[in-house]
Amino acid sequence: MLIKRPDDIPPSEITPRKLFEQRREFIKAAGGLALAAGLPSLAWAREAFPGLQKSAYSTLEPPNSFRDITTYNNFVEFGFGGKSQPAERAGAMKTRPWTVSIEGLVHKPRTFAIEDVLKVAPLEERIYRLRCVEGWSLVVPWVGFPLAALLRQVEPLGSAKFVEFVTHMDPATMPGLRQPFLDWPYSEGLRLDEALHPLTLMAVGLYGEELPNQNGAPLRLVVPWKYGFKSGKSIVKIRLTDRQPQTTWNLAQPEEYGFYANVNPDVSHPRWSQEKERRIGEFFKRKTLPFNGYAEQVAQLYAGMDLRKFY
Amino acid sequence: MQPTSPQLTALKAALFAACLWPLAQLGWLAWTDGLGANPIEFITRHLGTWTLSFLLITLAVTPLRHLSGWHWLIRLRRMLGLYAFFYAALHFLTYLWLDQFFDLASIVKDIAKRPFITAGFTAFLLLIPLAATSNAAMVKRLGGRRWTQLHRSVYAIAIIGVVHYWWLVKKDITLPLLYAVLLGALLGFRALRLARERQRQLSTYL
């Protein structure tokens, strides 16, 4: 197993070996004491998701630092004015209590409390590449579970063909909503087979901790083979439909943002090429891979489709 | 208000230093790890918006001169214009070097196929002859009338520059709009004066 750490730790912050070995001894001793006292072990006290499972779907590429992942965001409800705005402004968003209703073409429509969503399936760490339509990319160690597990709970009807994701809309804490550039609430959508694909993730955390608000707390979609805007943040409603749902960026600029939005180096954005991307933290641009490097897993979903037409 | 010659020299020196502020800012942020997760994008945007700002500041000299009667302001204009070119050149160099790393094939494709890059590149090319003819010897060589005609192209350059910014942004056009409105006011002032001048000439003929 590869043990990774964020790359922005200055050498001065790294604990000398001797000291951390002493700490381990201390924690062991403390854990022993706690056990003896019938208390939960101190060693787990700060970990949000104990017992996370590793996933075979994780990339071996080194993740970006926690700082990069949580300060360089597009979350337009918190402003269009720069990548640092979500981190500066999202703190005010209330993520508890939180419910997600799943409705539409399902046998058992249901409104889940976030606490129950967390129990739907064992939580995994999934280290995924994230490619933004703007030409940059990150590697993110998400915590989550397959969306399919959540959808199974409500038993989709045979007539369901698409899934629509509606996200949180609170004008009091989201200044971006005051701007008329997009139709709010921010909505996204997938074909049902895309939604049920094992790579499609409901993320609730990153770096082993609960999602920071700017990354879409408490619950967001992650579809790693599509451009980032497809992965809606802070989801409140999931609706199964028989018709392709209207999606926010597609409504705003259909010639620039398609419904499918699969990462594709051969289909340019009208204003820039998608052949290359800048991985945050790297100097040289790297080549963008078809389906963001997940072609082996997902390309068959689009067999026979003209991906230039269905961009 | 008319500054004396030494006062003007001091003013020019102060202005020269002040105009280096955007560059110093970049240096400071780089030193303190403040350029964010995508430093190349930050540097490009910073230099780009300052290029537009310096173009507008340069274009503000004439209206300001007429409105205030401080005709000596004209003596600061060349420096401001050259700073606009300086930041444009750094902006272009950032794209060439840091963003594309001199990948000529990709750059040529960008310029040909991406309207916002086509616009930005055009504006930069058009600025070069203006910077090259900015000294007194060139004014003399070209002759005042031809020099003035050539340098009027800065109006078109500024418009293309704002269009370049407008086409770049995703959805929030607040800042490009602000530059467009300011530029509109600066060019509108000139148009209005020209129209009034024509009117006056016409009435003297009659």
Image: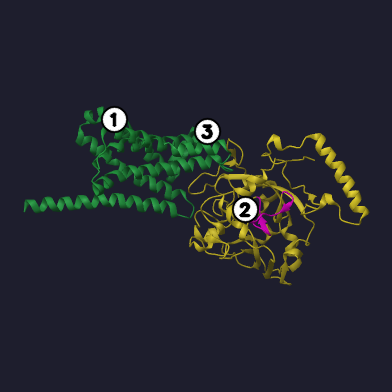
**Type of amino acid at the residue the image marks with label 3:** Phe
Residue A115 percent location from the top left of the image: 75, 64
* Point 16% across, 50% down: residue: B197
B102 left or right of B178 in image: right
Disc 2 designates what residue?
A: A304
Task: Tell which subunit mark 2 falls on.
Answer: A
Q: Secondary structure at mark 3?
A: loop
Which residue is label 3 attached to? B101
Secondary structure at numbered mark 1: loop
Residue A232 visible in the picture: no
Name the tint of chain B in the rendering.
green
Which residue is denoted by mark 1 in the rendering? B135
User: Cα distance, mark 1 to mark 2?
Assistant: 64 Å
At mark 2, the secondary structure is loop
Disc 3: CA contacts within 10 A as few (<14), some (14-19) or many (>=20): some
When asked about the image quadrant of residue B121, the answer is top left
- The region drawn magenta spans A207-224
Q: Please state the horizontal and vertical placement of residue A160, each as a whole percent of the image.
A: 67, 67
